Image (cartoon, grey):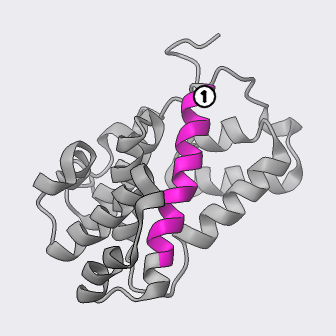
Amino acid sequence: MSTTSSISRFPTPELKNLPDDIRETILSVQEKAGFVPNVLLTLAHRPAEFRAFFAYHDALMLKETGNLTKADREMIVTTTSAKNDCLYCVVAHGALLRIYAKNPLVADQVAINHLKADITPRQKAMLDFAVKVCLDSAAISEADYAPLHAHGFDDEDIWDIATITAFFGMSNRIANAIGMRPNTEFYLMGRLPREK
């Protein structure tokens, strides 16, 4: 049963009981971030799915090629996760967006209404397409590509926008169905200057 103090309605495995590769991944993230994002602990409940999920996640979000920045990728996730009412992904990826964009306001703005956010016309075109993929992908037509091309996105970038949106659509549904809660650390990340 879900409560506000639990991170998921499903059991969370103990680190010592996890396969070595998953435990090492979690400890590596903890060392870098200073905490363990709850998504790692909740998905570790099913090791094979954990591996598949993060392999695809990393292929989409950590790739070094193309015209999408890390901030662009997180902006897509934050915006479309809000359309899917996913608390975990809006909070967690909104934190990453604030950090990568070096902008404490942008995540809240795009999560509420990207059309009124203080973003560039290029980002607006990117998010217009992502939202259409999120809400009405069957209606995507050749005409939807033209605004993206006009802003310098090529077809590989458009593939990235679509697949990031689709992957996180799946992630949003998993997070909502299992009651995954965001870590409290995410709420303040990127909102205030880092302490030196």
The residue that label 1 is drawn on is: 177
Report whether 30 appears left or right of 146: right
Q: Is residue 17 left or right of residue 149?
A: right
For label 1, the crowd category at 10 Å Cα-Cα, with few meaning under 14, some 14 to 19 and many 20 or more, is few
Which of the two residues, 122 or 14, is positioned nearer the viewer here? 122
Task: Pick whichever, 144 or 110, lies toward us.
Answer: 144
Residue 139 part of the magenta-drawn span: no
Above or below: residue 165 compared with residue 147: above
- Residue at image coords 15%, 72%: 120
Number of disc labels = 1
Specify the quadrant of the image occupied by residue 70: bottom left
In this rendering, is residue 8 above or below 17? above
Instruction: Return the residue nearer the eye: 40 or 146.
Output: 146
Residue at image location 58% in from the left, 46% down from the top = 171
Question: Circle 1 sits in a helix, a strand or a loop, which is it?
Answer: helix
129 and 183: which is toward the camera: 129
Image: magenta residue range: 159-178
Residue 117 placed where, x, y %? 14, 55
Picture coordinates of residue 168 (x, y %)?
A: 52, 52
Instruction: Please provide percent x and percent y for residue 147.
Output: 25, 79
Q: On screen, 164 above or below 181?
A: below
Q: In the image, 146: left or right of 158?
A: left
- Who's the residue at 83% across and 46% down the image? 47
Q: As shown in the figure, which amino acid type bears the numbered disc 1?
A: Ala
Quarter the C terminus occupies: bottom left
The kind of secondary structure the magenta stretch mainly shows is helix
Is 172 on the left or on the right of 135, as rendered? right
In the displayed structure, 135 sits above or below 187; it is: below
